[in-house]
Image (cartoon, rainbow, N blue to C red):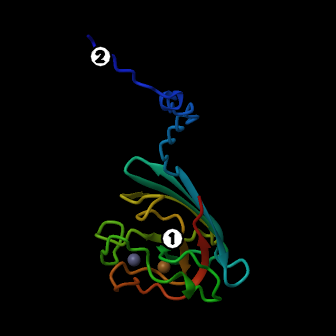
Amino acid sequence: MNHTTTLALTAAALAALLPLSCAAQAAMPAAPAAGPTAAHAVLQPAAPGVGAGEVTFEAMGDGVMVHVVVAGLAPGSKHGFHVHDKGVCTAPDFTSAGGHFNPSNHPHGGPEAERHAGDMPNLVADDKGSVDLRVMLHGTELGGAMGVIGHAVVLHAGEDDYKTQPTGNSGARLACGVITP
Ligand code: CU
Ligand code: ZN
């Protein structure tokens, strides 16, 4: 005689717990973070018209091409010109912009020397008191922690001697402009 074993299986036990179709949508691939290719600043003078101007920055090669247009200066005068650390041009004397932009902790210097990232050549006014200068800043960047965006350009009353630390001793601040993309 064979013994027959009957196994009772409940329907419930058989209900397959199939996950509902996950409605997960394929995540959109993140666009590559393209860095800024240009930036600009409007130089706002402390005294009306004295050193008013505009500065544009364009990514180029291993650095940034800067185009500076300024008016209202004494003919033939020379003026220190730098990117300063803080993008704040509110104080009447523009001390709000802080010291020179110097993310790589270099000494102050001229175009041919080791320099702050924010150091630029002196601006020299023409016989009408205007400046229209293009200068290439090798190694300078636009965006990111090492970039000039978010900082400020400052035009000084006097000439930068490229030596005095950490300012170049170029005197009072005539005009200031925050650098924006
Ligand atoms: Cu300066
Ligand atoms: Zn400097």
Name above or below for residue 147 compared with residue 1: below
Residue designated by label 1: 123
Which amino acid is tagged 1? Answer: Leu
What secondary structure is found at the residue carrying circle 1? strand
Q: Residue at x 60, y 71 (%)?
A: 178
- Residue 46 appears left or right of 125: right
Mark nearer the viewer, 2 or 1? 2
Estimate the x, y position of residue 121 in percent, counting from the top left. 43, 69
Residue designated by label 2: 3
Q: Earlier in the sequence, mark 2 or mark 1?
A: 2
Name above or below for residue 5 compared with residue 17: above
User: Looking at this view, is 169 or 124 the one in front?
Assistant: 169
Estimate the x, y position of residue 125 in percent, counting from the top left. 57, 71
Estimate the x, y position of residue 170 in percent, counting from the top left. 46, 84
- Residue 100 appears left or right of 178: left
Q: Identify the residue at the far right of this view.
A: 48
What secondary structure is found at the residue carrying circle 2? loop
Estimate the x, y position of residue 17 in percent, counting from the top left. 50, 33
Q: Residue at x 40, y 46 (%)?
A: 61
